[in-house]
Image: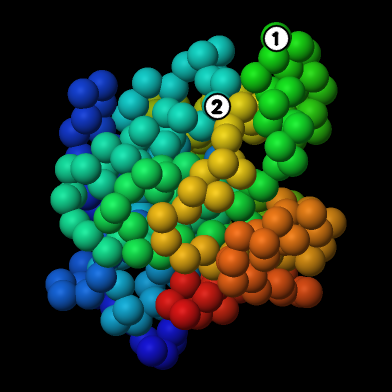
């Protein structure tokens, strides 16, 4: 399969749930096995358009906006979020509604971890393809279940930075101008920033604001009471892991070793960072298609 081959133009879709609506994009490819892709914290499905468009004819591709992100409209109360179970349950609800077999579940960072959590105990999963999953040590996840965790979490750099993030601007061009000058975005492939902001911003009275509220992003970073390694041990399908080598990777040496013991296929990229799908979308499409 040639990852350079483009599939059909994506179309938005929405699915009603009991408490609101899940939104996302679909690259429809009837007859191909289904793939569901889940994004990282603070982002949305549209940010991965280049990568998912380059999957060729390998899959019938769906990409969700997770709760509190993009165009999905589901309750997102930061004070109530202690783990990623709400994300997991939304993905399971989507899969239950679709009623298809042979799913490849894929994701990036938060989305990769959520894919793994959602897969546990299911019989409709054929593969798990995880890009830089948030693979925390088991002791940290145990600490996150204790009463002292909120005090500890408030001191985490990611949590503090997210909580202080600017969320409103007068127009979209102002956001693009501001973001394009930041170091974080300079390594992104051309056009990926614009893809992200397509649904990463919401039009509101007087301008635009981030679709993922800073308070919800911060709460998501802090919500580490997740049984990640239990889900990995119980994975119902083969595991493939993409890991970056740089210090910002969420798949550290201990995690790579543990994944190997579980029989996972691991690809380590010495040049990519944690945001590899934004930096090297076509290379990551090849990983998903392999």
From this view, report whether residue 274 is shown above or below residue 288: above
**Image marks 1 and 2: residues in contact by CB distance under 8 Å:** no
> Horizontally, is 258 left or right of 168 in the view?
right
Regarding residue 264, the answer to whether it shows in the image is: yes
Mark with earlier residue (1, 2):
2
Query: x%, y% of residue 62?
Result: 30, 58
Locate the N terminus by quadrant: bottom left
Q: Which mark is residue 279?
A: none
Residue labelled with disc 1: 147
In the rendered image, the vertical position of residue 160 relative to residue 267, given as above or below: above
Q: Position of residue 246 (x, y in %)?
A: 81, 63
Q: Residue 189, can we see it?
A: no
Left or right side of 119 for 140: right
The span from disc 1 to disc 2 (Cα, nearest Å) is: 14 Å
State the residue position of label 2: 83
Secondary structure under badge 2?
Answer: loop
Q: In the figure, 133 relative to 223: above or below? A: below
The relative height of residue 281 versus residue 95 in the rendered view (above or below) is: below
Residue at 55 percent across and 27 percent down: it is 83
Tell me if mark 1 has few (under 14), some (14-19) or many (20+) residues whose alpha carbon lies within 10 angstroms of its own: few
Q: Residue at x 33, y 58 (%)?
A: 125
In this view, the residue in front, 238 or 191, is 238
Q: How is the image coloured?
A: rainbow
Q: Nearer the viewer, residue 154 or 173?
A: 154
Q: Position of residue 230 (x, y in %)?
A: 56, 41
Looking at the picture, how far across and down is residue 13, in whole percent? 22, 49
Asked whether, in this view, residue 183 is left or right of residue 10, the answer is right
Crowding near the residue tagged with mark 2, few <14, some 14–19, many ≥20 C-alpha atoms within 10 Å: many
Residue toward you, 198 or 47:
47
Query: Residue at position x 38%, y 72% from top?
Result: 53
**The residue tagged with tag 1: helix, strand or loop?**
loop
């Amino acid at each position: 399969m040639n990852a350079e081959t483009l599939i059909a133009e994506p179309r938005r879709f929405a699915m009603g749930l009991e408490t609101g609506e899940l939104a996302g994009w679909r690259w429809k490819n009837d007859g191909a096995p289904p793939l569901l892709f889940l994004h990282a914290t603070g982002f949305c499905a549209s940010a991965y358009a280049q990568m998912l468009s380059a999957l060729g004819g390998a899959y019938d591709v769906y990409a969700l906006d997770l709760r509190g992100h993009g165009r999905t409209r589901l309750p997102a109360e930061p004070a109530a979020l202690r783990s990623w179970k709400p994300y997991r349950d939304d993905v399971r609800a989507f899969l239950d509604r679709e009623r298809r077999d042979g799913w490849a579940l894929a994701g990036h960072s938060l989305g990769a971890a959520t894919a793994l959590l959602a897969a546990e105990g299911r019989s409709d999963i054929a593969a798990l393809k995880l890009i830089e999953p948030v693979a925390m040590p088991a002791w940290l996840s145990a600490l996150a279940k204790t009463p002292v965790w909120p005090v500890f979490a408030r001191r985490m750099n990611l949590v503090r930075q997210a909580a202080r993030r600017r969320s409103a601007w007068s127009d979209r061009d102002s956001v693009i101008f501001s973001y394009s000058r930041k170091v974080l975005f300079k390594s992104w492939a051309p056009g990926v920033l614009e893809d992200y902001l397509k649904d990463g911003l919401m039009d509101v009275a007087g301008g635009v604001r981030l679709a993922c509220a800073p308070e919800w992003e911060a709460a998501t970073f802090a919500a580490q009471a997740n049984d990640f390694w239990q889900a990995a041990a119980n994975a119902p399908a083969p595991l493939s892991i993409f890991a970056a080598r740089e210090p910002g990777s969420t798949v550290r040496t201990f995690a790579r070793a543990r994944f190997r013991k579980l029989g996972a296929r691991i690809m380590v990229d010495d040049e990519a960072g944690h945001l590899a799908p934004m930096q090297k979308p076509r290379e990551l499409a090849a990983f998903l298609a392999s």
